[in-house]
Amino acid sequence: MDWKNRFAQRTTLMKRSTVREILKLTAQPDVISFAGGLPAPEFFPVARVQQAADVVINERGVEALQYSTTEGMPELRQLIADRLGFEVSIDNVLMTTGSQQGLDLTARIMMDEGDPIVIENPSYVGMLMALRSYDLEYIPVPTDGDGAIIDALEPLLQRNPKLVYIVPNFQNPSGTTLSLPRRKQLVELLAKYDIPLVEDNPYGELRYSGEPLPTLLELDAQRSGGIESGHVIYVGTFSKILTPGLRLGWVVAASPVIDKLVQAKQSVDLHTSTLDQFIAYETAKDGFLEEHIPQLCDVYRERRDVMLAAMERYFPEGVTWSKPDGGLFLMVTMPEYLDALELLDEAVRHKVAFVPGADFHVDGSGANTFRVNFSNAQPDRIEEGIRRLGALLHEAVAQVR
Amino acid sequence: MDWKNRFAQRTTLMKRSTVREILKLTAQPDVISFAGGLPAPEFFPVARVQQAADVVINERGVEALQYSTTEGMPELRQLIADRLGFEVSIDNVLMTTGSQQGLDLTARIMMDEGDPIVIENPSYVGMLMALRSYDLEYIPVPTDGDGAIIDALEPLLQRNPKLVYIVPNFQNPSGTTLSLPRRKQLVELLAKYDIPLVEDNPYGELRYSGEPLPTLLELDAQRSGGIESGHVIYVGTFSKILTPGLRLGWVVAASPVIDKLVQAKQSVDLHTSTLDQFIAYETAKDGFLEEHIPQLCDVYRERRDVMLAAMERYFPEGVTWSKPDGGLFLMVTMPEYLDALELLDEAVRHKVAFVPGADFHVDGSGANTFRVNFSNAQPDRIEEGIRRLGALLHEAVAQVR
């Protein structure tokens, strides 16, 4: 037998990301694609990054190009700690190569084969991909318009999951946000059952309506007397608030957890790009994000509103969708008898694309749902794309009747 | 029990890199440290990188800051393929976040718990660290001044190892190079036993004396009728020939292997920094490396020669050392009755540092050896550092007599 057929057991569990496959298939300029999760590139702060790169290489070039510590650039970790808005030490912050690495490293240090993990249903497909090779037992917690249903979570925690994974703000794919009462209820349960939770928060700062809510990290630290005695492993990223190409994310957690993550990271990539960390720090250090994020929010708010209005106008009765207060995504639910994968075939022929929802679900449901991104297309393209989708949905509904 | 004591089994096998701990302990300006593996920062092409960053962000800023493919920037992969000097397609090249990631991903797709792996004794400690969490069975192959002893390898291959791991050029820590006859013999054995080999080649282009030798990748491809039917998983890096802070490495292998590595990489960090890849490509695309590497070689050759001459002058009889034709390291062997860890204590008090050899060995041997880096210090500091070490060695030898 050829050695190329003797991969490790975990490798046989891996697969290529279907989202990425769909992105590739639909990456043509004439297709209006709602499939991606990309920030709007026309609002990347290119000039500011250019200026930062210039300063950094001029003033600290040798340092910015040399190996650095696994933990990451101290000034950048301090900035991240400060922006969390409550007492966090840089010893609680690890820089990672994108937040995806934070998710993978957390699984790597926490999860043995077959371990149970509680996960929202539907959930972020990147996390589901990362978890595949760890061969876990998924315990799906049902969700509604206020996020994970915490009353339904308590009996699941009695099954001793090793970890709970939650995207509390403007969840990918559903667009929903975990309400404040549920957040408080959730951190109580974490303490009661002594179970750690991964709070994956890439979109938290992209809020377009409603009141900002405290992170689970903060609520849990308040309740537990500080991060060191808390239960939350928080994962953040610059991808959605600065630019994704720098691959800069971070984990915030109790220092014994950071210590294990550092050991794991030493063995997987030694450290995150020194230059990218220096550039991000130089870009952000004088309050740039505090100016930039509200501008992004204005742009994305308009796009969300255009999309919601277009759906109202063009989508047939029987089709529903979430109304997110922020983030990049919303989720459409069609009547049970329709299949989003079949609709996608038709949609691509009409030059419009989205991501079918089945892959986000861990229990085989969701075939009648799909995820739509509203941040990456101009308003007139959003209007036209939703008009096309609406026509297809009308047809599909009519055919069945 | 606190959840922070319930890490995964693999986590209990991890440990912090002792080399990094020693580096931290000895990172004081008054210590002459031969402990690191750092390229000489005074020869980083800072101005060239600055110019490249400027061009890239000016001309392709949006693209350079956006998400990109897992496989990596096509132009950069093409450049890497071209520089290998024989027929390699970009489909055989995957960009990684440093070569450390190439090593970890390869272990990840290939190795199940308990699988045997043939490894040089001594071997690169970063690979040994990466392998810890995979809980493997090491099969050490003995080495001499010509690298791994291939006659001793054949009986080991009969034990069906899943992988062979070799650093053929100027090995870390020994400084030795696998001879051409042994390379030819080795690729024959790989074919005969159908066993894959990781060729870890960070230093191959840093040759200061002797004739360049073909890579195992090339010899194996010639023998097997091309990379697609070959056995070598080749790992390279810009860290030693450009700058390490960009964290840019690559893997070259048959496309089914690259395909699995891509799937693994999608789940661990999505892709390597877009900006860093663009900068590296812009820096290297017009033959810059072909000018820069010979200059680096001139500097490092002098430092190697200064160190070898100083050892000749200052080290006592009974102490031997390798005479590398390139790379960054050489290895010192003391009489059996001396312990490098004890010597390090004494050395640090005399403001000079190195890395004890025990951690590079997989069979408990090597306590009387230590690794010395010659690339990172100026010639006068090398001379002074070796003088101090020589005095300590004379003392240690005299004490026992």
Image: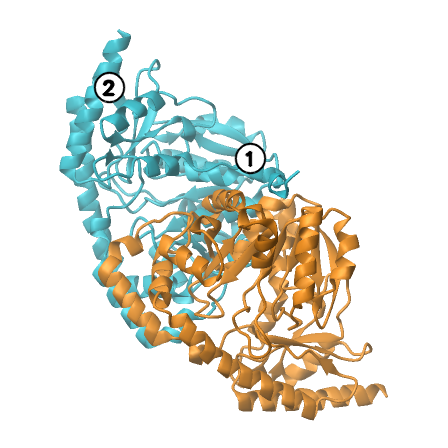
Chain colours: A cyan, B orange
Look at 20% across and 28% down and name the residue there.
Answer: A386
Residue A249, image x and y in percent?
40, 53
Answer few, some or many: residues within 10 Å of disc 1's Cα (few below 14, many 20 plus, some between 14 and 19).
Answer: few
Task: Identify the image quadrant of residue B335.
Answer: bottom right
Name the outermost residue toward the top: A401
Circle number at residue B83: none
Question: Can residue B112 be seen from the camera position used here?
Answer: yes
Look at 29% across and 40% down and name the residue there.
Answer: A327
Residues at marks 2 and 1, CA–CA distance in whole angstroms:
35 Å
Residue A155 position (above or below residue B7): above
Left-right relation of B127 to A311: right
Label 2 element class: helix
Residue B208 position (above or below residue B195): below
Given the image, what chain letter belongs to the residue carrying mark 2? A
Q: Give yes or no for contact between labels 2 and 1 (Cβ–Cβ under 8 Å).
A: no
Given the image, what chain letter belongs to the residue carrying mark 1? A
Look at 31% across and 67% down and name the residue there.
Answer: B52
Question: Can residue B350 be seen from the camera position used here?
Answer: no
Using the rendered image, report if marks 2 and 1 lie on a common chain: yes
Label 1 element class: helix
Tell me the quadrant of the picture where the N terminus of chain A can be found. top right
Name the N-terminal-most of marks 2 and 1: 1
Left-right relation of B171 to A149: right
Residue A374 position (above or below residue B333): above
Residue B283, image x and y in percent?
35, 67
Circle number at residue A13: 1
* Amino acid at pointer 2: Leu
Task: Identify the image quadrant of residue B180.
Answer: bottom right
* Amino acid at pointer 1: Leu
Look at 58% across and 61% down and name the residue there.
Answer: B200
Residue pointed to by mark 2: A393
